[in-house]
Amino acid sequence: MSNLKISPHDLIGCSFYGYHIEVLVEHNDVTGIFVSQKQGEYYIIKLALAQDAIPLIEHEERIIQNINHWGVVSFISRIDINGFPALVLHRYTRGVLAQYIGLLSIEEISNIFSRLCEVCDFLREHDIFHRDIKPDNIALDNGGVPVLIDFGMSCCTGKQEEYFTGTLDYAAPEVLKGEKVTYDSELYSIASVVYALIHGIPPSKDHALRTSHGLSVQEDAKLNRMLNLEPSSRREKKRQVNLRQSLKKEKVKQSTNLYIFMCIVLIFLLWFSITLLLPM
């Protein structure tokens, strides 16, 4: 265990770089989370409390400082508190998903499911794995949109350690066996979160794994697919994706053709009306 170099309780009421620390949200041996206020606006401060945590805070800063996406925690700045690094982050006043298990409507859960998949795809495009997706690490913004927070365990593709990172209840089976996190592993974690929101417990604790979730037929099928024990079976088949995209393009084409036809009809009617008004 690391010895604390800063006592988190001693920081309450202190100000650093204009940020007045008001509340200690939580802390462990190496990091502390605080609510701070600056010029009437509230922020989260994540502080390294010990030498061991400095690399973790600096790593998280490198990961999130250049990301501008609605589904990733907003980085404001870095400050130093008594010689230790601290990240100033956006504060999401609705809290984290862990507070809402069993309390959300199916419509809200459906939206969260869709948005989390979008965030996962975005991170994949930027070669980033979160590696600890769980209800406690997903905040809700004022519009009910999920936002991934706590990137302390995240990594870039090809730079993973050989030891386990994550939370047992939400980690993919292959990760629990010692394999590295992949995009497919992240999909499993997202599905586990959604499953818990619906059924009250993650699938790892449900002895009779349910396949009916009350979502749409397509979403139920997607959730079940993402919970597949075989990583390669969690993604939508390329043929299905291509078919869906083709249908979407066909709908756009049909809408465009209809629009053109209506324009022609309107032009003809206008011309016909004008000819009727002209003197013979």
Image (spheres, rainbow, N blue to C red):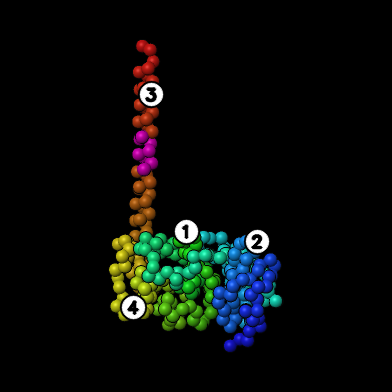
Mark 1–mark 2 CB contact (< 8 Å): no
Q: Nearer the viewer, mark 3 or mark 2?
A: 2
- In front: 156, or 139? 139
Say what amino acid the circle numbered 3 marks: Trp
Q: Nearer the N terminus, badge 4 or badge 3? A: 4
Instruction: Say whether residue 36 is left or right of residue 239.
Output: right
Q: Which residues are magenta?
A: 255-262
Q: Residue at x 31, y 67 (%)?
A: 213
Q: Which mark is residue 46?
A: none
Q: Nearer the N terminus, badge 1 or badge 3? A: 1
Q: Quadrant of the C terminus?
A: top left
Distance, label 4 to label 2, CA atoms, is 47 Å
Q: Which mark is residue 206?
A: 4
Q: Secondary structure at mark 1?
A: loop
Label 1: few (<14), some (14–19) or many (≥20) C-alpha neighbours in 10 Å:
few
Q: Nearer the viewer, mark 4 or mark 3?
A: 4
Q: Secondary structure at mark 4?
A: loop
Say what amino acid the circle numbered 1 marks: Gly
Distance, label 3 to label 2, CA atoms, is 63 Å
Q: Which mark is residue 39?
A: 2
Determine whether 217 is above or below 58 in the image.
above
Distance, label 4 to label 1, CA atoms, is 31 Å
Can you name the residue that lies furthest to the top here? 280
Residue 35 place in picture, x, y as percent: 59, 70
- In front: 160, or 147? 147
Q: Which mark is residue 271?
A: 3
SS assignment for the magenta stretch, majority? helix
Q: Residue at x 35, y 39 (%)?
A: 258
- In front: 115, or 247? 115
Residue under circle 1? 143
Residue 260 place in picture, x, y as percent: 38, 36
